[in-house]
Structure formats: structure tokens, C-alpha cells
Image (cartoon, rainbow, N blue to C red):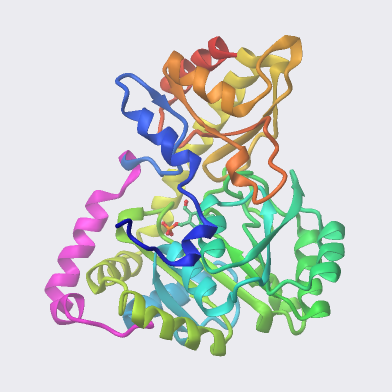
Amino acid sequence: MPLQFADRLDNVETSAIRELFKLLGKPGIISFAGGFPDSAMFDVDGIREAVNTALTEEAGGALQYGATEGYNPLREQLARFMTDKGASDVAPENLIVTTGSQQALDLLGKALISPGDKVFVEGPTFLATIQCFRLYGAELVSAPIDGEGVKVDELEALIAEHRPKFIYLIPTFGNPSGATLNLERRKKVLELAVKYQTLVIEDDPYGDLYFGAAPPPSLLNLSASVPGSRELLVHCGSLSKVLSPGLRVGWMIAPAELLAKATMCKQFSDAHTSTFAQATAAQYLKAGRMPATLAKVRAVYAERAQAMGQALRRELGDAIEFTQPQGGLFIWARLTGAGGKVGDGNELAKRAIEKGVAFVPGAPFFCANPDLATLRLSFATADVAKIEEGVARLAQAL
Ligand SMILES: Cc1ncc(COP(=O)(O)O)c(C=O)c1O
């Protein structure tokens, strides 16, 4: 007899991207497909030192069960980390530690979404968010974006029409868009939250990965200047892209009532995030190594982003258009079809694998009305020589 699964699984399907990833094992493939940071960038010495200190000074706490809200020394370090970045009123009790920011998204889905609720996401947005919110029965509405993030006038019209349960945004160096919401629009988003009493979720795993000038202040930082907005704002952070995704350390800052519900949901999910990982992260932050680590990853990714942008312009010319990213891990591009070249991201992805280079077509990142000409290229894990070779192969596939 076939196994009977929960009805909620009817709302999601295995992602097209996973299918593509199966092909990445082919020898010699240069991959621009992942959303990973570069393993060569991990501060192994710093993490080793943090592990040793944790085991020497606090083995009991680091190896024992812990509080669902998070290991207090880490909550303190994270509150300081956020305060140093310009957030006001972030005390340890205003945040909970999550198993990656992915878990924060899952807890928000679990705590907030009833089947049929309208939830807004950017078009395009992080694929796992689409899948996760759909699993809880959300009806997703796509809020259009351009190179400066979500278009606030259209957002307001959509809010007035649909009255969403909440709005999920990746305002800084979005995945996959690379786009950054400009300052004016950030203020407007917070004002809209207050005007329509709508919760806004700011997912911010990439904000620290800027290449030149720092991006505009986060919605969290700006909320201090828009009365009433802080009570309607959730901020999700993560150490994954800046330090190590394997640690699975993320956090969520939210109004007390919501944190309490999310904590309850987390109890049934994993009881707590690994205390060992939390103690390690706390010691790492306490040792003061983060600024140097950030400086290093920013410099390396900036060089690679530059190299990829130049190579794409040189090798693909007017067959592709994109905005040069100012941070993050991705170039989001559109095929123009100029000169009779391939204009469909899926088609190019297949041909590219044949030529030995992989990337992710853009269509799956849209919850509705996919733009089939789009693609996402990660510049994070290949060095400059590989980036140039990979882009040359891409040009051959066009
Ligand atoms: C926008 C966004 N949110 C959340 C995550 C999840 O990251 P983690 O669970 O490793 O913190 C990712 C990872 O790719 C992401 O791109």
C-alpha cells in the first residue's frame, strides 16, 4: 500500500534546483550554482580556539541540554553584535537563537500561518522560504522588485488589496536578486507596516557582506525612527554566510509575544539549538575575531564579484543584462536573446552543464509569474581564474 502523507505536502514539490544539483557531481564542472560561502574562507584557527575555550571554561554548559531560547552567553554576544551594528534596544531577552535562520523562517511559518493566509514575498525570493511558507498553507503573493528592492507603491496597493498576514523581505543583497532596498523605500516599508498594522519580516543573512560603502541601515536599525514600527518587525540574522553555515547558528529578534510563540514551537522542533555550537559561536564573538573575518570575506567576494561582472560583460555582451552587486554572493541576470542567442534560463542551464559550467535558472525563485529569462550566478566559491573560465564556457553555451 502506498504511504499516506499529510495533505500539507500537496502544497510543495521537490525543487527544480535540487534536480540540477544532481548533475553537479560531473567531473570538471565549474559551479556558480550554490548558495554557499567559500569553505576556504572559514576561520578554522579562530573556531578551533573558540571550541577549546568553550570546552575548557564551560564544558557543562556547552555539552548539556540548554534553554530553548538559546544559550545565554551567546544571546549576550549577539545582542552586543547587533547593538554594535546600530540597532537600539536589543537586549539578550529580545532575541532567540535558532538553528540557522532557516529555522527562524520555519518557526514564523508555524506560529503565524493558517491555511489560506496571504503572505507577501518578493518576486524573486529565497526558494526555501517559498517552500516553507507554502507547507503551512500560505497563499503567496509576489511583490515586484527592481534593482533597488521592493517597489513600495505597488507594495502598498497589494497590501490594501490583500491585507497580508505578513510581508517577508530580504532588503539587503537579496537572494537571488542581489538587490538592496534604498533608504527611502526602507522608511516607506516601515511606515506601511504601521499604517496597515502589518507584520514585516526582515531576513538579513547577507547585510554584512558589503564590498564598498555599507548598505543603508537595516529595517531593524531604522525602526527606532518610525514610531510603532518596532512592534511590527521581525529581524532574522545568521552566522552562516559570514562565519560558517555548519555551525547552524541564527537568531530572531521579534516582539515578546511572537518570540514566546516561536519558542514554544521550537520546543517541539529541536528543543534547542546545539549548545556546543552556541558556546563555540559565543566564544568566537567574545574573542573579537569577527571584524577581521568580515574584512577578509568582504575583500575576497568583492574581487570575485568584480571579476564575474567584467567577464560576463566581456564574454556575453548584450546577450545578458544585470546590475553589478554591491555585496552578497550573487549576480542576478537576464538573458536578452540579442543576436538570436538563448533567451531562456532553463535552456541555457542545460546547455551550460554540457559545456562544464553550472548556474541556477531564475524561474523557481518566483512564487508566481516567473521571469523565464533570469538566472542566478554565485561568485562566492570559485576563484578568479575559475570564474573567468566558467564564464567563457557559459558564452560557448549561448
Ligand atoms: C535569504 C536567506 N535566508 C535564510 C537562509 C538560511 O540560512 P541559514 O539557515 O544557514 O542561516 C539563506 C541561505 O541561503 C538565505 O539565502
Query: Which residue is found at the position 64% from the left and 15% from the top?
Result: 316
- Image quadrant where one finds the N terminus: bottom left
Q: Position of residue 294 (x, y in %)?
A: 44, 51
Residue 21 in magenta stretch: no
Q: Main SS type for the magenta part?
A: helix
Q: In this orientation, which residue lies closer to the viewer: 294 or 20?
A: 20
Q: Residue furthest front?
A: 1
**Front position in the image: 213 or 228:** 228
Q: What is the number of callouts on the image?
A: 0
Q: Is residue 141 above or below residue 391?
A: below
Q: What residue lies at 57% left-to-right and 48% top-to-bottom?
A: 175
Q: Provide the residue span drawn in magenta.
A: 40-69
Residue 82 lies, in percent from the top left, at: 51, 71
Residue 76 falls left or right of residue 318: left
Query: Horizontal and vertical percent for residue 113?
Result: 59, 74
Q: Tell me the quadrant of the picture where the C terminus can be found.
A: top right
Q: In the image, 273: left or right of 165?
A: left
Q: Answer with left or right where residue 321 lies relative to residue 244.
A: right
Position above or below: 304 against 266:
above
Q: Residue 64 colored magenta?
A: yes
Nearest to the observer: residue 211 or residue 348: 348
Q: Is residue 244 visible?
A: no
Which residue is painted at 55% across and 33% down in the image?
305
351 in relation to 90, above or below? above
